[in-house]
Image (spheres, grey):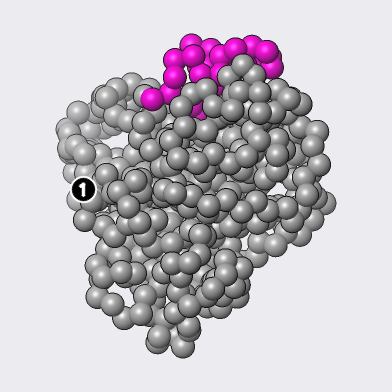
């Protein structure tokens, strides 16, 4: 949307759904001062012509339960968490569920009318489904460096903590106050190392299903203090809205529409994104490549939707981008971020003091616990779109294993020229086995 609209700090729209889409997001609207500071950082990034950087974010799910056995709601199974990580890694690289539903003429004429830069468009002239270069993994170790019995999961009994059951709170605000003021401060892991996600039950009468904290910039000179602190940073979500029924149908979900997009949306807020309608009628989300939108969408719209719903600037002739992750359509109907949204996320990752250290502590994969060697091995080109060469002129390497960030082994080879042509875009780990019985783990990026 074009800039130029005044965004009221405490404006909030209440919107009720008939389906599980994102449910209702109760993330707070950042202040104008916060956005002004963010815009300065974005402008600095564009001036310096910064390139997109690959990141990997360790995730810890704090599952709050009342003593139920694992697999009994709300003490949901690890497989449901695993399915969520798979969804995030697909969605944040532009390879997720239903991207092939993107219309062949989507926003082509609007992009021409608005003179959208060519770098924001695909080869059909559409607004591009962008790759954020951000990946997620289940944390393998806790803050003390001890390996987790269940990667990425901490199970917390609220009865043993002396807390109330989260499902007793009668309003969205009282539930949020409980999560922010009681649960988070007592359970948060270092927010500079982990993305903390709290998973709980809630009252059936509440429409809230998720909220997130925006990236704080208080550690930077001239940046105003935000409401995000080291004691509340992260995401809350309703336990029945996490994970993907399509990937793990044995989980416990609101309904079969649940495809993991609640957390795709909320983590978007965590990385600095706004709702696509700007939290007001035809307000701005500060991205020039998202058409103006009058209200949040719902259900499963058809393209084009809402043509002419906004006039300054106009979204004609192609209407609203209901398939954007920062809208409220149902899970199957959303499948994209735009280039400008990626710029916001990349800016947050590079500049926020509680984002710019994520993924730098070696806690993302169990492979980080493997024996290391001081040998220096060169790999090139890295990133690569096709093959990668392991430069081993002294023939010290006996074999190589290739892993995803989830620790899943996908190949073993003795070849030093490795083809990644058919591998999905993302971050991979090579575990090198040397003939002196040592190992080394190196990161490679498939673009």
Q: Name the residue under label 1.
A: 436
Q: Which residue is drawn at 24% across and 75% down?
A: 69
Q: Residue at x 41, y 42 (%)?
A: 331
Question: Looking at the picture, does residue 80 appear above or below residue 311?
Answer: below
Q: In terms of depth relative to the viewer, which is nearer, 47 or 443?
A: 47
Q: In terms of depth relative to the viewer, which is nearer, 305 or 136?
A: 305
Badge 1: few (under 14), some or many (20 or more) residues near its Cα, within 10 Å? few
Question: Looking at the picture, does residue 350 appear above or below residue 314?
Answer: below
Q: In terms of depth relative to the viewer, which is nearer, 174 or 390?
A: 174
Q: Where is residue 154 in the image (x, y as percent from the top left)?
A: 37, 70
Q: Where is residue 68 in the image (x, y as percent from the top left)?
A: 28, 77
Q: Is residue 85 among what the camera can see?
A: no
The part of the chain drawn in magenta is 101-130
In the rendered image, residue 116 lying in the magenta stretch gets the answer yes
In the rendered image, residue 422 lying in the magenta stretch gets the answer no
Please give left or right for residue 3 compared with residue 182 in the image.
right
Q: Where is residue 165 in the image (x, y as percent from the top left)?
A: 44, 79
Q: Is residue 325 among what the camera can see?
A: yes
Looking at the rendered image, the quarter that the N terminus falls into is top right
Looking at the rendered image, the quarter that the C terminus falls into is top left
Q: Is mark 1 on a helix, strand or loop?
A: loop
Q: Residue at x 50, y 28 (%)?
A: 130
Please give left or right for residue 361 compared with residue 295 in the image.
left
Q: Where is residue 42 in the image (x, y as percent from the top left)?
A: 71, 36
């Amino acid at each position: 949307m074009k800039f130029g609209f005044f965004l009221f700090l405490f404006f909030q729209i209440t919107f009720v759904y008939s389906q599980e889409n994102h449910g209702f997001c109760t993330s707070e609207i950042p202040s104008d001062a916060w956005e002004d500071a963010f815009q300065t950082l974005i402008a600095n990034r564009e001036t310096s012509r910064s390139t997109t950087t690959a990141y990997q974010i360790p995730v810890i799910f704090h599952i709050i339960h009342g003593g139920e056995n694992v697999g009994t709601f709300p003490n949901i199974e690890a497989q449901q968490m695993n399915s969520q990580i798979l969804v995030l890694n697909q969605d944040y690289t532009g390879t997720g569920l239903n991207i092939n539903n993107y219309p062949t003429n989507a926003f082509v004429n609007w992009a021409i009318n608005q003179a959208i830069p060519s770098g924001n468009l695909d080869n059909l002239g559409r607004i591009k489904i962008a790759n954020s270069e951000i990946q997620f993994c289940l944390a393998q170790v806790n803050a003390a460096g001890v390996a987790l019995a269940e990667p990425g999961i901490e199970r917390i009994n609220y009865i043993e903590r002396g807390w109330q059951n989260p499902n007793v709170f009668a309003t969205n605000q009282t539930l949020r106050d409980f999560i922010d003021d009681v649960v988070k401060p007592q359970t948060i892991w270092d927010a500079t190392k982990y993305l903390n996600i709290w998973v709980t039950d809630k009252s059936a009468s509440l429409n809230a299903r998720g909220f997130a904290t925006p990236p704080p910039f208080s550690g930077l000179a001239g940046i105003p203090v935000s409401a995000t602190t080291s004691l509340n940073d992260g995401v809350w979500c309703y336990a029945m809205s996490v994970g993907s029924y399509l990937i793990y149908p044995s989980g416990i979900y609101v309904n079969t529409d649940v495809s993991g997009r609640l957390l795709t949306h909320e983590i978007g807020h965590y990385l600095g994104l706004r709702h696509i309608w700007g939290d007001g009628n035809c307000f701005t989300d500060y991205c020039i490549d998202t058409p103006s939108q009058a209200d949040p969408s719902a259900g499963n719209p058809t393209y084009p939707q809402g043509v002419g719903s906004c006039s300054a600037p106009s979204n004609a002739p192609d209407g609203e981008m209901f398939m954007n992750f920062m809208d409220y359509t149902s899970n199957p109907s959303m499948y994209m971020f735009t280039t400008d949204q990626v710029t916001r996320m990349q800016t947050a990752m590079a500049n926020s003091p509680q984002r710019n250290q994520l993924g730098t502590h070696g806690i993302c994969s169990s492979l980080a616990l493997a024996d290391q060697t001081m040998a220096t091995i060169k790999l090139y080109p890295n990133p690569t779109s096709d093959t990668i060469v392991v430069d081993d002129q002294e023939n010290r390497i006996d074999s190589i294993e290739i892993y995803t960030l989830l620790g899943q082994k996908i190949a073993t080879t003795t070849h030093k020229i490795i083809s990644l042509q058919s591998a999905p875009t993302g971050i991979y780990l090579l575990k090198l086995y040397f003939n002196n019985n040592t190992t080394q783990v190196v990161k490679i990026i498939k673009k």
